[in-house]
Image (cartoon, rainbow, N blue to C red):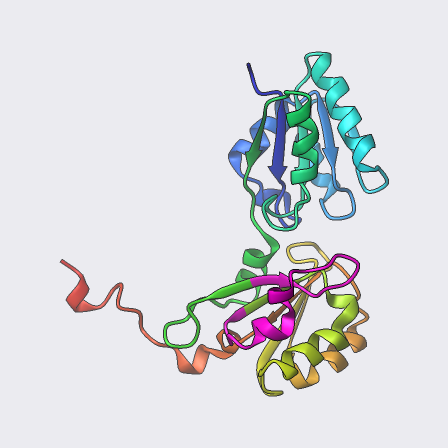
Amino acid sequence: MAVQVYFIGAGPGDPELLTIRAKNIIQRADVIIYADSLVSPEVCRFAQDRAEIYKSASLTLEGITNIIVKAVRQGKVVARLQSGDPSIYGTILEQMAVLDEKVIEYEIIPGVSSLFAAAAALKTELTVPELSQTVIITRLEGKTPVPALEKLKNLAAHQASLAIFLSASLIEKVVAELLSGGYKPETPAAVVYRVTWEDELLLRTTLGKLVESVKASGITKQALILVGAFLDSKGKRRRSRLYSKGSIK
């Protein structure tokens, strides 16, 4: 059975960060459903003129899957565009569950996560020798609960590179949890708003000043919070052993 449905990672915003495979599928898709609150409409400019294009921000899960199922039954190719990479807060499992029930084949095309775009914009590396070799991707508990062992306070105890999604509107609670978990107020922190978009904003500060910086900027959503020693590694750069003389043969 030929694949007709593609869940595509549309990247953080800049259309030029689409993968070649993603662009090729968008160009031949008959139906495109894109997360218009997070995916740039410029991505859809690669679509053919006759393609049906739907914005998903105002659609329910049932509305989205009804469009997909109807299109498949008509023999059409569907491109479902998700922001960043679909595997990180992509909400694709619930969509795939419907397709599995309908015995509809699909494929997932990975994309550039806003996390990696943010690290690039900040000109930093998430894993720095002797500073941090672990990256924790998480979110603060809000309307969506998190497992008990994954509370932000508990994760803070690891002192790893921390990437906090979907939590800018709860910045006071984020900071309180991190401080109570063991991070010091002078820990480097950053907030990256709409990375790769024209109105991208980068805030560099410390954990102790994070609430003040975020409130002054007016940022409440579409932002990634980064915390950890890796953000202040320029004066503490350790040479990796990958390119040391002893490792090159």
Residue occupying the point 66% across, 29% down: 79
Please identify the residue farthest to the top as the structure is shown. Answer: 74
Front residue of 106/190: it is: 106
Front residue of 5/20: it is: 5
Residue 91: x and y in percent read 68, 44
**Is residue 191 in view?**
yes
Front residue of 108/11: it is: 108
Residue occupying the point 62% across, 87% down: 185
Q: Which residues are magenta?
A: 137-161
Q: Quadrant of the N terminus?
A: top right
Q: Is residue 219 left or right of residue 182?
A: right
Q: Is residue 144 above or below residue 176?
A: above
Residue 81: x and y in percent read 67, 37
**Is residue 206 in view?**
no
Q: Is residue 59 above or below residue 190?
A: above
- Figure disc tally: 0
Front residue of 2/12: it is: 2
Does the magenta run of residues contain 113?
no
Q: Is residue 214 left or right of residue 207?
A: right
Does the magenta run of residues contain 155?
yes
